Image: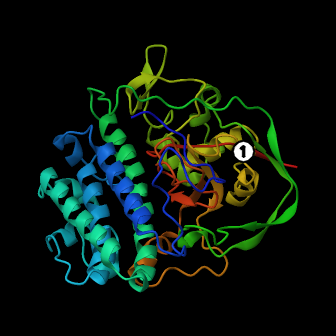
């Protein structure tokens, strides 16, 4: 799979993914054909990403944070069945009630579920049976979109839209999870031998931030997750943000200066999560003679010194910033800097760590019901990342999007850019 750039924040329709995003849920008259096309595009993209993987590949779970490809394909299908079809398609025949336990992820209100660490033990249903499950749900969703009244679709489309963006999130996880699994394999298998990391923009200098009260968050137009709202005012101090992402060459300087061996650079939890446990380089880096190699979706390759550093944790990003005598931007500074497309490579290469804890915006209210568990209950002990990565599907990235991970995690395509005070 060739790497492709993500949707820019000022674009509303991506010509490279012509059926996604769908029309706004409030658009009237309702364009049923467009919604069916968007649904098909997302569902087909999941299968396209899974296609290079054998049944054995799709079964493996390499760590508790990762999930098997087969589980991803089934879980996103369960999401549509659970939240859309069971509630809104009269007479819908559940494909197999036993799958509810296997493919619920973390929705407590939806019932008990397979422990996350045991998803790799789900050898049955088979890959073929998961494909049949997906086809069953696909037909039912298209029936719903074709036959439901306009009044019913007013309730259906917001749930469908969440389901589409949810599946895109799992499309990214599908790639990062299989990369982690392949990195444990001594054969160094390639997901796609032709895969290449996109070139970063050749940029120097910084984006200037003036001191201002800025509006942050979703504008109310188009799709958003609930954690992007409500839109609110935030003080942005004067400062500067680098136009370029930190590269592997720069990171190697940190390593060669003993950055992983200097506890004074590290948060206490970070020291005991990383260097004290043997970290000496970004995730997937391996010594290769006199240099370094890294595991990629194209297999093991020499580290490209001019590419953005990736597979780093928040703890590593924070330590690097301290070593450089600088700091990570807040998510609000990042959003203001990227607002007018003045921040090169904000999207499509690596998610960028910010120093912002993942917290609710002032006045935040989660969605009602079980879907309220989607974001809000994770607002503790995690940090916000902004932008998107090489693995993010076309049309998914948006300016106010808030990604979040625990500070020790580094199996995603995560990198950084630095900032300075005025």
Please say which color scheme the image uses. rainbow
| Residue furthest out toward the front | 29
Q: Position of residue 18 (x, y in %)?
A: 48, 50
Residue that appears at 67% across and 58% down: 331
Quadrant assignment for the N terminus: top left
Q: How many numbered badges does the structure rendering display? A: 1
87 vs 5: above or below: below
Occupied quadrant, residue 101: bottom left
Q: Is residue 163 above or below residue 280?
A: below
Which image quarter: residue 184?
A: top left
Q: Nearer the viewer, residue 83 or 186?
A: 83
Residue 259 in view here? yes
Residue farthest top in this picture: 290
Please determine whether, in this image, residue 166 is positioned above or below residue 193. below
Residue 93 lies left or right of residue 290; in this view the side is left
Q: Tell me, yes or no, if residue 104 can be seen here.
A: no
Residue 338 left/right relative to 403: right
Which residue is nearer to you in this view: 114 or 93? 93
In x, y percent, where is residue 154? 45, 81
Where residue 323 sits in the image (x, y, percent)? 70, 38
- Classed neighbour count for the residue bearing mark 1: other residues with Cα under 10 Å, few (<14), some (14–19), many (≥20): many
| Residue that numbered label 1 is attached to | 343
Q: Residue 104, percent across and down?
A: 28, 69
Specify whether 367 is left or right of 253: left
Residue found at x 37% / y 44%: 175
Tell me the SS state at disc 1.
loop
**Residue found at x 30% / y 67%:** 142
């Amino acid at each position: 799979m060739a790497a492709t750039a993500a949707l820019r924040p000022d674009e509303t329709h991506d010509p490279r993914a012509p059926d996604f995003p769908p029309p706004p849920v409030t658009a009237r008259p309702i364009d049923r054909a467009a919604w069916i096309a968007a649904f098909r595009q997302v569902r087909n993209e999941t299968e396209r990403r899974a296609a290079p993987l054998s049944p054995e590949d799709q079964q493996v779970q390499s760590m508790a944070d990762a999930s098997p490809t087969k589980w991803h394909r089934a879980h996103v299908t369960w999401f549509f069945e659970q939240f859309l079809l069971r509630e809104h398609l009269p007479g819908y025949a559940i494909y197999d009630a036993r799958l509810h336990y296997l493919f619920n992820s973390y929705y407590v209100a939806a019932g008990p579920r397979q422990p996350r660490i045991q998803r790799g033990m789900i050898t049955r249903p088979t890959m073929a049976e998961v494909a049949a499950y997906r086809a069953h749900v696909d037909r039912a969703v298209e029936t719903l979109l074709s036959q439901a009244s306009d009044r019913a679709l007013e309730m259906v489309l917001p749930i469908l839209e969440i389901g589409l963006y949810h599946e895109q999130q799992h499309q990214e996880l599908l790639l990062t999870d299989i990369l982690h699994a392949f990195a444990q394999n001594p054969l160094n298998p390639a997901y796609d031998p032709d895969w290449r990391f996109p070139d970063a923009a050749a940029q120097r200098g910084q984006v200037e931030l003036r001191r201002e009260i800025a509006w942050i968050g979703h504008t109310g137009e188009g799709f958003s997750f609930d954690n992007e709202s409500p839109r609110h005012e935030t003080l942005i101090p004067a400062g500067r943000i680098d136009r370029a992402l930190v590269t592997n060459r720069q990171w190697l300087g940190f390593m060669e200066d003993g950055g992983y061996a200097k506890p004074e650079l590290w948060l206490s939890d970070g020291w005991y999560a990383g260097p004290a446990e043997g970290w000496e380089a970004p995730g997937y880096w391996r010594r290769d003679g006199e240099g370094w190699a890294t595991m990629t979706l194209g297999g093991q390759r020499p580290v490209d010194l001019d590419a953005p550093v990736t597979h780093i944790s928040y703890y590593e990003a924070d330590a690097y910033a301290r070593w450089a005598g600088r700091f990570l931007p807040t998510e609000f500074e990042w959003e203001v800097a990227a607002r007018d497309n003045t921040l090169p490579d904000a999207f499509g290469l690596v998610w960028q760590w910010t120093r912002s804890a993942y917290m609710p915006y002032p006045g935040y209210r989660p969605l009602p019901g079980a879907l309220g568990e989607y974001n809000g209950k994770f607002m503790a002990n995690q940090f916000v990342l902004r932008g998107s990565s090489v693995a993010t599907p076309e049309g998914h990235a948006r300016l106010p999007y808030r990604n979040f991970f625990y500070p020790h995690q580094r199996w995603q395509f995560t990198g950084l850019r630095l900032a300075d005070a005025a």
